[in-house]
Amino acid sequence: MATSFRPVRVRFAPSPTGPLHIGGVRTALYNYLFARKHGGKLIFRIEDTDSSRFVPGAEAYILEAFRWLGIDFDEGVSFGGDKGPYRQSERRDIYKEYVQQLLDSGKAYLAFDTPEELAAARAATPNFQYDATTRGTMRNSLALPDVETARLLKEGANYVVRFLVEPGQDIVVQDIIRGEVHINSSVLDDKVLFKAADELPTYHLANIVDDHLMEISHVIRGEEWLPSAPLHVLLYRAFGWEDTMPQFAHLPLLLKPDGKGKLSKRDGDRLGFPVFPLQWTDPVTGDTSRGYREDGYLPEAVLNFLALLGWNPGTEQEMFSLDELAEVFSLEKCSKAGAKFDYMKATWFNHEYILQKTDRELTPAFLRLLADNGVDTTEERACAVVGMMKSRVNFVKDLWPLCEFFFVAPTAYDEKTVRKRWKEQSPEQMRELMDVLAGIDDFSIRGQEAVVHAWIESKEYKMGDIMNAWRLMLVGEGKGPGMFDISAFLGKTETLERMKRALEVLA
């Protein structure tokens, strides 16, 4: 819950190491909803202290994803603000100050162990960790004489700064979703906080310093970060910042569709759904991964779907606008258990949002689809087809195979439909229908309907026989909306030309 004495300030802080996973989108969404619910601020911070994992284009990709989704930030990289810089690689001097503060207070120490020495220690000791029981046997400023430490520094030896974790302490993490989480400090190791090689802090130090200086009130992040929380509590204590420590909320994991393990890209590849908001092309391998935007999902549908993965409003309502979500969102109603990623539900949401869109709103996307298939038509005609057919699709892209016949006359006729719908009397009945249609001046739906129904009744023909054969002639198979909708859209000339051509083939 929000505190009564601190303004709500939350942050989403991705690393530019590749495309944004859909689980990260949900974390950002929950932060956004929480901030809006409490009239607070959402900060966008880039955590790029691990330069070895930097991927060109990743930061721009993440920003574009949020622009498409409609998640707005109040401060941060590309948004401005008075607590920047908001990119961690630009805050080196700030972190050095706080590293020195920990060293001066005896809460941290220098470690000179080489990668080879650390590997040997791990090989010699099962489950080795750098802690109170092992640090005395390693090469660090606690175990070495002061003169040796000074010599190593003078010679420019590489080192890291490790946090000094005292064993036997009971650490309590207050979590809004999970309640009190108790951890004994003896299970923690002396984490690296700073690396002299690149003069950058690790995630642990940078996060604590940034959250403090940016006055973050709540840290809302994935469950995978819960093991880091006890160390972060100790760091807040070491700096004397207990009174400004943010409240934690660790969100449930997104699970595979069968619930067995954490959702991964491989699950999407295997089952045919995206796990990234936008399409991503790896700058090294050139491999392309699917995105929700390019697969035809509406951003509103994606957000509504994600909001309900791990959070329940406590009602039967499923369809929410972003404003409605912000109004009812509560961290206390988030689940502790992981949420199965029901990708078919995402498709259902997309269908429902297509139904909510006006025909005019969907028309630009349909026009692009038509252009891709070589069709040049007016906005009005495209809009009319959208109105007739949108209830039948889950994605706008699905309209083309269903609606091609509106714009392209059939050149072949489905054999199965011919056998079932084209009867012995059909040629003669369709010739009569052509004469009836040719004599209609008002070729609107209502104008045709009255005349054709009267003719069918006067001839005592079966309605199904007439309509099924007529559909086959205009469409080429047994699909589409009502026949008068089709013929009115095509117009008298095109309708009669298609019927004439069909008779030449089918009769």
Image (cartoon, rainbow, N blue to C red):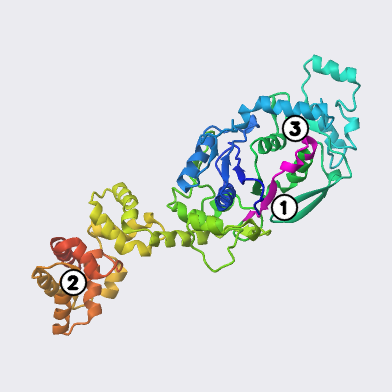
Where does residue 483 sit, x and y in percent of width and height?
24, 70
* Residue in the picture at 54% in, 55% down: 326
- Residues in magenta, as a range: 237-255
Asked whether residue 420 is drawn in magenta, I would say no
Q: Amino acid at mark 3?
A: Leu
3D distance between C-alphas at marks 2 and 3: 77 Å
| Label number found at residue 175 | 1
Asked whether residue 244 is drawn in magenta, I would say yes
Where does residue 194 sit, x and y in percent of width and height?
73, 29
- Which one is in front, 257 or 139? 139
- The correct choice, above or below, for 154 with respect to 442 in the image is above
The answer to whether residue 242 is visible is: yes
- Left or right: 145, with 271 as reference point: right
Marks 2 and 3, the one that precedes in the sequence = 3
* Residue in the picture at 70% in, 28% down: 95
The answer to whether residue 279 is visible is: no
Q: Secondary structure at mark 3?
A: strand
Q: Are marks 2 and 1 in contact (CB under 8 Å)?
A: no
The crowding category of the residue bearing disc 2, from other C-alpha atoms within 10 Å (few below 14, some 14 to 19, many at least 20), is: few
Mark 3 highlights which residue? Answer: 193
- Which one is in front, 115 or 129? 129
* Residue in the picture at 24% in, 55% down: 380
- Which one is in front, 244 or 108? 244
Q: Secondary structure at mark 2?
A: helix
Q: How many marks?
A: 3
* Residue in the picture at 54% in, 36% down: 59
Mark 2 highlights which residue? Answer: 446
- The correct choice, above or below, for 351 with respect to 291 in the image is below
- Left or right: 212, with 464 as reference point: right
- Left or right: 95, with 403 as reference point: right
